[in-house]
Image (cartoon, helix red, strand yellow):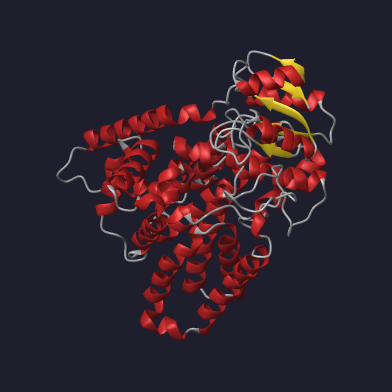
């Protein structure tokens, strides 16, 4: 028995246990309705995957459920096109829906699967560049940060993006270290993959340039294979952009993401990004100490300044997309691996570093306190993200039960598509901040376009609009959470 245990290698076992922990933590509320935090964005992603099953797979014409113009004052989107990133994530989810039924939990499991792959790749990168203990600590923090737990089980491409981004950096570095055909192929594949998923990977060309410079100095400019890799990786992205330009009605507004209202570098910009999001939500206040310690430690010769260039890429991304980062907390998902790397480096020094002038006992105690408080305070901020919007889920189920499968639905909550998604029908997300606000003219116009159902969780029966509905249309079902009218 003793000999058997000696043969077991501890590091793979620990990594496996971390992966199990990461998986189990992300099962929390995995079966809840799609009405949790950022459900408006998740619903669009999920509806594309669902429509791939309901209407037939068409990668080049992804469709959502909503026919509202995607840009204020823009063209009608009767075909329900949704052209953002290529629907790679939805294309992976769709087969699971096809064989096992359309369940949001399956899409969340796909996200979790990609994130587990991201943990493995980041472990390999940090363990080979620094050491295995830092690699394991990095994997541990990736697994347990509450912000990471929530945003790597959502129905959005972000977990896939993390997997692709880390793979892009890892395999490019591996190819530079040991040039092989397979290594070069994987570097091309992951770079192409990452650039297609989101915009952030474009900024990772900065640490990749550093890696090339680290090996060749300025001679990297003459390396044909590097130029070939970049060109091959960018061509599919250019082709996709040229393709979607043919469908302007299916492209959501995006100019505002850069610097709406001149937010960049204003006090609110720094407050929301570095205090609210990074300091409080991701690091739970107490993680800042470990991260700063990791930042100031001298890097190893092998890693050089690579992780700092990676950090610089993130900061440039935040600066360029200032409004997007201030508005949406999921825009900071690319910070997750960076946070965990520097948390791991700081923790490694506390746990295993030279203690000539410091007490080992208090170093260990400080590590436990910092990590414990970090996770506790971060969870305090994140726990509400799992809450379901009141009535949106049950109202959607009720419409799905009462209406015919082809009935078009007009919702009255807001331009948030969550309620429309939960009805499992096509239609229009009307109400507050929507091009189709709650008034009689809009209602009759929607009815002339084929709307058969009006549903809302925010009904004011004493308003002019409420009285008009009650007088002219049949109430199919009414509860204290929602009301459904037949049009």
Quarter-wise, where is residue 213 in the image? bottom left
Left or right of 359 in this view: 364: right
Left or right of 433 in this view: 54: right
Between residues 424 and 295, which one lies in front from this camera angle? 424
Q: Residue most toward the left?
A: 357
Across and down, in percent, residue 114 comes to 60, 48
Q: Residue at x 16, y 46 (%)?
A: 356
Q: Residue most toward the bottom?
A: 222
Q: Residue at x 27, y 46 (%)?
A: 267
Quarter-wise, where is residue 268 in the image? top left
Q: Residue at x 48, y 83 (%)?
A: 223
Across and down, in percent, residue 41 comes to 58, 42
Q: Residue most toward the top?
A: 480
Across and down, in percent, residue 283 comes to 36, 39
Q: Is residue 182 above or below residue 43?
A: below
Residue 133 showing in the rendered view? no
Q: Is residue 416 above or below residue 128?
A: above
Residue 234 showing in the rendered view? yes
Between residues 437 and 296, which one lies in front from this camera angle? 437
Q: How many marks?
A: 0
Query: Which of the image's four quarters has the C terminus?
Result: top right
Quarter-wise, where is residue 310 in the image? bottom left
Left or right of 55 in this view: 128: left
Q: Is residue 65 above or below residue 118?
A: above
Across and down, in percent, residue 196 comes to 60, 61
Q: Is residue 49 above or below residue 174?
A: above
Between residues 450 and 150, which one lies in front from this camera angle? 450
Query: Which of the image's four quarters has the N terminus?
Result: top right
């Amino acid at each position: 028995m003793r000999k058997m245990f000696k043969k077991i290698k501890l590091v793979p076992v620990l990594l496996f246990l971390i992966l199990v922990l990461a998986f189990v933590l992300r099962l929390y509320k995995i079966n809840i309705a799609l009405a949790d935090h950022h459900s408006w964005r998740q619903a669009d992603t999920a509806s594309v995957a669902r429509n791939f099953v309901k209407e037939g797979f068409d990668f080049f014409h992804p469709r959502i459920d909503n026919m509202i113009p995607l840009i204020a004052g823009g063209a009608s989107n009767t075909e329900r096109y949704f052209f953002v990133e290529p629907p790679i994530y939805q294309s992976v989810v769709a087969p699971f829906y096809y064989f096992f039924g359309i369940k949001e939990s399956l899409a969340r499991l796909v996200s979790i699967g990609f994130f587990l792959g991201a943990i493995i790749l980041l472990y390999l990168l940090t363990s080979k560049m620094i050491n295995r203990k830092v690699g394991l600590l990095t994997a541990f923090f990736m697994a347990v940060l509450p912000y990471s737990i929530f945003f790597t089980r959502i129905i959005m491409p972000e977990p896939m993006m993390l997997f692709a981004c880390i793979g892009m950096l890892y395999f490019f570095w591996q190819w530079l270290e040991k040039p092989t055909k397979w290594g070069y192929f994987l570097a091309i594949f992951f770079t192409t993959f990452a650039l297609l998923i989101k915009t952030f990977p474009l900024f990772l060309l900065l640490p990749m340039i550093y890696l090339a410079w680290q090996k060749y100095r300025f001679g990297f400019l003459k390396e044909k294979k590097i130029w070939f890799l970049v060109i091959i990786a960018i061509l599919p992205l250019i082709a996709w952009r040229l393709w979607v330009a043919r469908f302007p009605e299916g492209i959501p507004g995006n100019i505002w993401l850069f610097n709406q209202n001149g937010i960049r570098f204003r006090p609110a910009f720094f407050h929301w990004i570095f205090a609210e999001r990074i300091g409080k939500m991701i690091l739970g206040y107490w993680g800042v100490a470990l991260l700063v310690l990791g930042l100031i430690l001298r890097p190893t010769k092998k890693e050089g300044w690579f992780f700092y260039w990676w950090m610089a890429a993130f900061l440039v991304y935040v600066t360029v997309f200032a409004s997007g980062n201030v508005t949406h907390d999921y825009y900071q998902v690319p910070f997750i691996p960076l946070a965990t790397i520097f948390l791991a480096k700081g923790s490694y020094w506390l746990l295993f570093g030279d203690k000539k002038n410091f007490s080992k006992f208090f170093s260990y105690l400080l590590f436990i306190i910092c990590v414990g408080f970090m996770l506790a305070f971060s969870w305090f901020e994140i726990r509400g993200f799992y809450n379901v919007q009141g009535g949106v889920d049950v109202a959607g189920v009720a419409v799905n039960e009462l209406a015919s499968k082809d009935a078009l639905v007009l919702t009255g909550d807001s331009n948030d598509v969550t309620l429309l998604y939960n009805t499992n029908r096509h239609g229009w997300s009307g109400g507050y901040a929507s091009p189709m606000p709650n008034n009689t003219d809009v209602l009759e116009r929607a009815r002339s376009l084929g709307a058969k159902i009006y549903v809302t969780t925010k009904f004011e029966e004493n308003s002019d609009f409420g009285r008009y509905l009650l007088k002219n249309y049949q109430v199919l079902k009414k509860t204290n959470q929602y009301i459904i009218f037949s049009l």
